[in-house]
Amino acid sequence: MATGLAVIGSGSAAPKASLNNDGLSKIVDTSDEWISTRTGIRSRYLASPQESLSQLSAIAAQNALSMAQVGATDIDLILLATSTPDDLFGSACQIQAEIGAKHAVAFDLTAACSGFVFGMITAAQFIRTGVYRNVLLIGADVLSRWVDWTDRRSCVLFGDGAGAVVLQANEIDHLLGFALHSDGCLHDCLNVQYQGESRPLTGGINVSQGTYQPISMNGKEVYRFAVNRVPEIVEKALFQAELTTDDIDWLLLHQANQRILDAVAKRLKVPAEKVISNIANYGNTSAATIPLALDATVRQGYIQPGDTIAASGFGAGLSWGAAIFQWQR
């Protein structure tokens, strides 16, 4: 029985509408120069009211299945890493129905911007133990639903999108190492907090009813956290894989801010030509950033079979993690 895994296909999807920095400057007091110099972002895709997270995820999933040459009915498990489902009970089952993966069990996993990496490690446990053979992992978010479009500090950062990979049981394990961490003491640095009001029912019994508030972020603290913790977690995963940064072909970080990508790469002593970045055109799409950037780089012909990739996600929770894997398609 195969007890390893391989990443054998990728896919991605983005909404039709793209809003550049000049367009954003008509909404809030900002400018292309202010945004691009501080974040590296020049435009982002935004989902219309007619475009859902499930639809974007299904397109990304179908593209990944096509590359992997795996049929939807061969998928055993669908993991959807998202913080913005169409349904608070979860959207993975909607995607299962949309793509016709009728034999797959499906569920959501929430770890914000770390979700895709956490999802990859979760999927690996099912494959390594022989429970499932083919796993579809999707990272997707529609953060525009929860952005305060009057707050120029945060609204310039976020976009919408979906990315997916197919993981398959393999005699050789191409997930070489990983490490995951969480620190709930830093929760207030980045969140989408529920806020409710008391509603009396009967006999002195009250319940809370309300909704979630827009994204709240302490940018300086998140930056400080990322540039300190991400190099550590990548090095820890590399140590588990018995590798060094000299052994990796690509550094694939959560696309939060170009300055974070540059700072982390510098601390790890990874040359700029090995750092994957598509933040200029997509912004921060949370759980979707890593698979979106991976798929683009694969389809552009840069990533080749056998290449070793160090991926790291980090964000709300606060949570952070890294996975060292080889691309096999």
Image (spheres, rainbow, N blue to C red):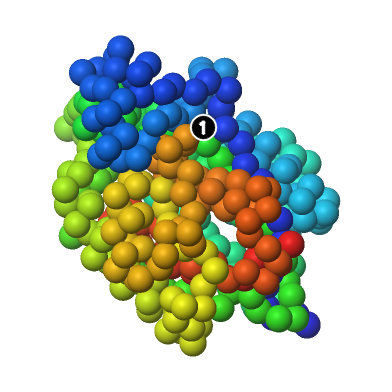
Image x and y of residue 305, in percent: 70, 66
Number of callouts in the render?
A: 1
User: Hey, which quadrant is residue 53 in on the image?
Assistant: top right
Q: Quadrant of the C terminus?
A: bottom right
Question: Residue visible at 57% across and 32% down?
Answer: 14
Q: Amino acid at mark 1?
A: Asp
Question: Residue visible at 35% across and 30% down?
Answer: 146
Image x and y of residue 282, in percent: 47, 36
Q: Is residue 312 left or right of residue 135?
A: left
Question: Residue visible at 18% across and 44% down?
Answer: 218
Image x and y of residue 108, in percent: 53, 49
Question: Residue visible at 58% across and 23% down?
Answer: 16
In the image, is residue 41 above or below residue 176?
A: above
Report whether residue 188 is seen: no
For the residue pair 185 and 245, the one nearer the viewer reads as: 245
Residue under label 1: 86
In the image, is residue 296 above or below residue 231?
A: above
Image x and y of residue 47, in percent: 50, 24
For the residue pair 52 and 221, the one nearer the viewer reads as: 221
**Furthest residue toward bottom:** 242
Q: Quadrant of the N terminus?
A: bottom right
